[in-house]
């Protein structure tokens, strides 16, 4: 029985396995560093150097996809793109800047939209930090960014076969915004109550 056809198949699959392992290594490193960057962002620290390293990994993955496009839906690769985009988008919105362009980030379209949805949760985290510091005005500004982001998300209504997991992420973002609206409302009421009590105390002290 001729072995040459089987040999070629094995060689092809072996080469694909090497590509997969390379993608896995680079993707996992990018995901870890994106997580570190997000932590730094919430601490108010610079994440530029970390994100620069992640960008280099994303560019490496893009180069691999140039010759191996069949890996574009590979889970680890998509996650690496998403986590990087999420960190950049979150930092940008927290700083009151415009959303970065897809081309500037160099990530997959699916990853960009997923990251946009995930960033709503990170913005809520920032809102809660601001409320704990009694920075109600800035918390309200960030909440408005959350709503603006969701307005973008609702423009995309595609099945999971086209945008995997996006509808679920959109539903989570909606619930996150509703909870945050309640937190802002309670904080406003608390502030008004405290101001009223202060006025009463001043009158009693006169």
Image: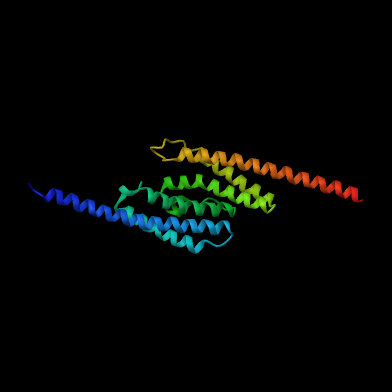
Q: Is residue 55 left or right of residue 131?
A: left
Q: Residue furthest bottom?
A: 49
The residue drawn where x is 45% and y is 48% is 112
Instruction: Give the vertical position of 155 relative to 7 (above or below).
Output: above
The residue drawn where x is 42% and y is 45% is 110
Q: Residue furthest right?
A: 206
Instruction: Give the vertical position of 59 relative to 203 (above or below).
Output: below
Instruction: Give the vertical position of 83 relative to 52 (above or below).
Output: above
Image mark count: 0
Query: Looking at the image, what colour scheme do you see?
Result: rainbow
Name the spot of residue 61 as percent of width and height, x first: 36, 55
Q: Residue furthest left?
A: 1
The residue drawn where x is 65% and y is 43% is 183
Name the spot of residue 182 as percent of width and height, x first: 65, 40
Name the spot of residue 78 as percent of width and height, x first: 40, 49
Q: Nearer the viewer, residue 68 or 184?
A: 184
Classify residue 40 by image quadrant. bottom right
Q: Is residue 149 left or right of residue 191?
A: left
Q: Is residue 151 left or right of residue 62?
A: right
Name the spot of residue 160 as percent of width and height, x first: 41, 37
Classify residue 184 by image quadrant. top right
Q: Is residue 25 left or right of residue 148?
A: left
């Amino acid at each position: 029985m001729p072995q040459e056809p089987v040999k070629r198949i094995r060689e092809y699959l072996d080469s694909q396995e090497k590509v997969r392992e390379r993608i896995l290594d680079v993707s996992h490193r990018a995901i870890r560093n994106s997580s570190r960057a997000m932590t730094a962002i919430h601490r108010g620290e610079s994440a530029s150097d970390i994100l620069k390293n992640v960008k280099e990994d994303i560019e490496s993955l893009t180069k691999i996809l140039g010759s191996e496009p069949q890996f574009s839906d590979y889970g680890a690769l998509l996650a690496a793109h998403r986590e990087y985009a999420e960190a950049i988008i979150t930092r940008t919105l927290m700083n009151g800047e415009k959303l970065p362009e897809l081309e500037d980030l160099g990530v997959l379209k699916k990853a960009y939209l997923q990251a946009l949805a995930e960033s709503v949760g990170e913005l809520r985290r920032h809102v809660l930090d601001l409320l704990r510091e009694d920075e109600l005005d800035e918390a309200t500004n960030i909440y408005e960014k959350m709503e603006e982001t969701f307005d973008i998300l609702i423009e995309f209504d595609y099945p999971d076969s086209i945008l995997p997991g996006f509808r679920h992420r959109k539903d989570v973002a909606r619930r996150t915004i509703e909870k945050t609206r309640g937190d802002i409302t309670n904080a406003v009421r608390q502030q008004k109550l405290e101001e009223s009590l202060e006025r009463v105390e001043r009158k009693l002290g006169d």
